[in-house]
C-alpha cells in the first residue's frame, strides 16, 4: 500500500484538513517531515518527524524513506525530481502532479528564474496561495488516490 510523505516546512494550512480527511478515509500511513513542529491532525496513521535545521534535511529524509509508488507532497521542485527518479509520485501544493514528462521542464524554469534573480533582476514570486489553489490540490489528490489506492 502506498505511503504519503509530506514535505511540511511550507505546507499551507488550507491543505491540512483536506489531506487529513484523505488519510483517515483511506487509512493511509503518512509521514509529516519538517525541521519544526507541524501538525495536520491527530491520527495513529500519521508519524511526525522533526529533522535537523537545514535547507535539504527534510528532503534527504523523505528520499531515504521513500519507496517506489509512494506519494510525496511538496512544492520543492528538486525534491520532486528526486522522487520521480525513484519511480514515486509528487504533487505540489497547487495541485500539479509532477511526472517524468514534465519534471525536467519545471526544473529548467526554476533554474532559469534563479539565474535571473542572481543577476540582480527583481522578480515577482509565486502568487499568494489561496482557496482556488486548495481546490486544485484537493482535486488532484482525490484523482491520484482514486487511481492508485485500492480500498
Image (cartoon, rainbow, N blue to C red):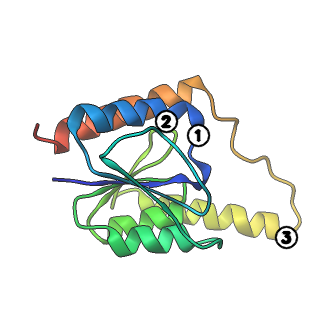
Q: Residue at x 52, y 67 (%)?
A: 58
Residue 36 lies, with reference to residue 14, above or below; the image says below
Say whether residue 104 is visible.
no
Between 132 and 59, the residue placed more toward the observer is 59
- Number of the front mark, 1 or 3: 1
Q: Where does residue 146 sit, x and y in percent of width and height?
A: 20, 35
Q: Residue at x 51, y 58 (%)?
A: 106
Q: Where does residue 39 sit, x and y in percent of width and height?
A: 52, 44
Between 120 and 131, the residue placed more toward the observer is 131
In the rendered image, which quarter contains the C terminus?
top left
Element type where label 3 sits in the image: loop
- State yes or no: discs 1 and 2 in contact (Cβ < 8 Å): yes
Q: Is residue 75 left or right of residue 89?
A: right
Q: Where does residue 130 sit, x and y in percent of width and height?
A: 62, 28
Residue 60 lies, with reference to residue 137, above or below; the image says below
Q: Which residue is mark 3?
A: 119
For marks 1 and 3, give the CA distance.
Answer: 30 Å
Q: Is residue 101 left or right of residue 111?
A: left
Q: Residues within 10 Å of mark 3 (few under 14, many from 20)?
A: few
Q: Which residue is mark 2?
A: 16
Q: Where does residue 29 sit, x and y in percent of width and height?
A: 27, 50
Q: Which residue is mark 1?
A: 12
Q: Residue at x 22, y 66 (%)?
A: 68
Q: Quadrant of residue 145?
A: top left
Q: Quadrant of residue 43?
A: top left
Amino acid at each position: 500500500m502506498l505511503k504519503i510523505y509530506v514535505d511540511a516546512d511550507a505546507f499551507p494550512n488550507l491543505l491540512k484538513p483536506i489531506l487529513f480527511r484523505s488519510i483517515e478515509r483511506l487509512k493511509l500511513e503518512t509521514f509529516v517531515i519538517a525541521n519544526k513542529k507541524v501538525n495536520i491532525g491527530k491520527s495513529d496513521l500519521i508519524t511526525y518527524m522533526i529533522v535537523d535545521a537545514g535547507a535539504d534535511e527534510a528532503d534527504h529524509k523523505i528520499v531515504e524513506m521513500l519507496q517506489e509508488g509512494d506519494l510525496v507532497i511538496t512544492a520543492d521542485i528538486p525534491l520532486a525530481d528526486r522522487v520521480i527518479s525513484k519511480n514515486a509520485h509528487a504533487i505540489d501544493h497547487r495541485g500539479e502532479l509532477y511526472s517524468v514528462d514534465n519534471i525536467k521542464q519545471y526544473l529548467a524554469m526554476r533554474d532559469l528564474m534563479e539565474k535571473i534573480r542572481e543577476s540582480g533582476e527583481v522578480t515577482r514570486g509565486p502568487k499568494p496561495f489561496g482557496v482556488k489553489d486548495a481546490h486544485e490540490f484537493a482535486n488532484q489528490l482525490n484523482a491520484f488516490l482514486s487511481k492508485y489506492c485500492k480500498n
